[in-house]
Image (cartoon, grey):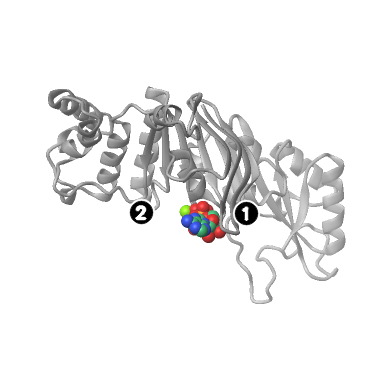
């Protein structure tokens, strides 16, 4: 559905995007994450046709957005709806007329566009707010009106740039639920740019990490989260913070593995639950005398039927840490000493 091939965008001597290849299949919700300056906004601007790529192609449902002759671009643009962090509704128009506005511009007859706008407001759960002005709506309600407006032209693709960054947690959940239900009901393909890992975890089927204008990682959520040692996986399934006692040792470390604490400072060993199940990890740890009591923190989620996440053990010494890591690795389980 969305195809980027060799997409490159250069501003003067800044390379904002370098040879990006990305495919998002129809009906999928794909998230794009990356640090500030990674190229996220540039990517979305190239996708909307607001910016033209220096080289490479962008196609949406087979229509080439980079086709300068115009026909492909017009067709591709029609198939895109946009949702922004700040919705930018017209203050002097009601919710209904805001949603109908793009249809008015497209020359759709009045009765038809108002009927369509009413239907869209129903879909986003604001059927009873049609006659309210933006000033009478909450942030979440305004964002819903924005989504209804983006759907007016019946786009095949919804591009969302930080759609929930300005919303509180429960409103965020509602908007994410709405985006997911739109995908389920309308079969729309969704691309979401976000800095919120929870957004990715909650609704994305697949995710791309951009770094310095390049694709650092891309894959289904399950693939990316279960990648041992990857920073994206750690960001997506964070471990709870660790309490430190007065000596700077991790709380709960004392005698935790039964090996005594005489061998120097305690160490933390982080284990990736990727191919391995939790019982497998515990059995292996036990074989070198590290019991479940030595688990300091853990984050486990089930994604697409697989347990993914990480477990952090505390062990009494560097030697024990090495022994544990070696035993786990011999079982094909990824482990590393954590800072
Ligand atoms: N119009 C422009 N002219 C010159 N340089 C630009 C322009 N737009 C973006 N850049 C540069 O391209 C790079 C990528 O910028 P971009 O806005 O895509 O980052 P971003 O990932 O959206 O960051 P943020 O999370 O802060 O919004 C940056 O180095 C930025 O300075
Ligand atoms: Mg940006």
Q: Nearer the viewer, residue 75 or 88?
A: 75
Q: Nearer the viewer, residue 117 or 53?
A: 53
Q: Position of residue 287 (x, y in %)?
A: 84, 45
Q: Which mark is residue 166?
A: 2
User: Residue at the location (27% across, 29% down)?
Assistant: 123
Question: Would you say residue 166 is visible in this rendering?
Answer: yes
Q: Nearer the viewer, residue 96 or 56?
A: 56
Q: Which residue is mark 1?
A: 212
User: Residue at the location (37% across, 39% down)?
Assistant: 82
Snapshot quadrant of residue 4? top right
The answer for how far apart the CA atoms under marks 1 and 2 are is 25 Å
Snapshot quadrant of residue 142? top left
Q: Residues within 10 Å of mark 2 (few under 14, many from 20)?
A: some
Question: Would you say residue 197 is visible in this rendering?
Answer: no
Snapshot quadrant of residue 268? bottom right
Secondary structure found at label 2:
loop
Instruction: Please indicate whether residue 27 sits to the left or right of residue 251 in the image.
Output: left
Q: Position of residue 237 (x, y in %)?
A: 59, 48
Q: Position of residue 286 (x, y in %)?
A: 80, 46
Q: Position of residue 301 (x, y in %)?
A: 58, 40
Q: Which mark is residue 37?
A: none
Seen in the picture, residue 111 relative to 138 is either above or below; the reply is above
């Amino acid at each position: 559905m969305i195809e980027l091939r060799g997409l490159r965008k250069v501003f003067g001597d800044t390379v904002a995007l370098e040879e990006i290849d990305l495919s998002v299949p129809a009906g999928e919700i794909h998230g794009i994450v990356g640090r500030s300056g990674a190229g996220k906004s540039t990517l979305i601007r190239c996708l909307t046709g607001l910016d033209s790529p220096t080289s490479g192609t962008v196609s949406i449902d087979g229509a080439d957005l980079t086709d300068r002759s115009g026909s492909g671009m017009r067709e591709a643009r029609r198939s895109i709806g946009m949702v922004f962090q700040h919705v930018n509704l017209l203050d002097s128009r009601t919710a209904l007329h805001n949603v109908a506005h793009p249809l008015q511009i497209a020359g759709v007859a009045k009765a038809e566009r108002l009927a369509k706008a009413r239907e869209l407001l129903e879909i986003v759960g604001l059927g009873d707010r049609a006659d309210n002005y933006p000033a009478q709506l909450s942030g979440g309600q305004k964002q819903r009106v924005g989504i209804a407006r983006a759907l007016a032209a019946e786009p095949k693709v919804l591009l969302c740039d930080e759609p929930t960054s300005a919303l509180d947690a429960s409103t965020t959940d509602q908007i994410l639920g709405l985006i997911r239900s739109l995908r389920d009901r309308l079969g729309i393909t969704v691309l979401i740019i976000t800095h919120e890992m929870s957004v990715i975890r909650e609704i994305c089927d697949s995710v791309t990490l951009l770094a310095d204008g390049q694709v650092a990682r891309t894959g289904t959520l399950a693939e990316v989260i279960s990648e041992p040692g990857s920073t994206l996986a750690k960001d997506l399934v964070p471990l709870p913070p660790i309490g430190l006692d007065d000596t700077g040792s991790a709380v709960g470390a004392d005698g935790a593995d039964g090996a005594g604490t005489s061998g120097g400072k305690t160490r933390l060993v982080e284990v990736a639950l990727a191919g391995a199940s939790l019982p497998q990890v515990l059995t292996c740890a036990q074989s070198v005398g590290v019991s479940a009591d030595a688990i300091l923190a853990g984050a486990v989620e089930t994604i697409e039927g697989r347990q993914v996440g990480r477990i952090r053990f505390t062990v009494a010494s560097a030697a024990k840490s090495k022994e544990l890591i070696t035993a786990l690795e011999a079982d094909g389980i990824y482990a590393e000493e954590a800072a």
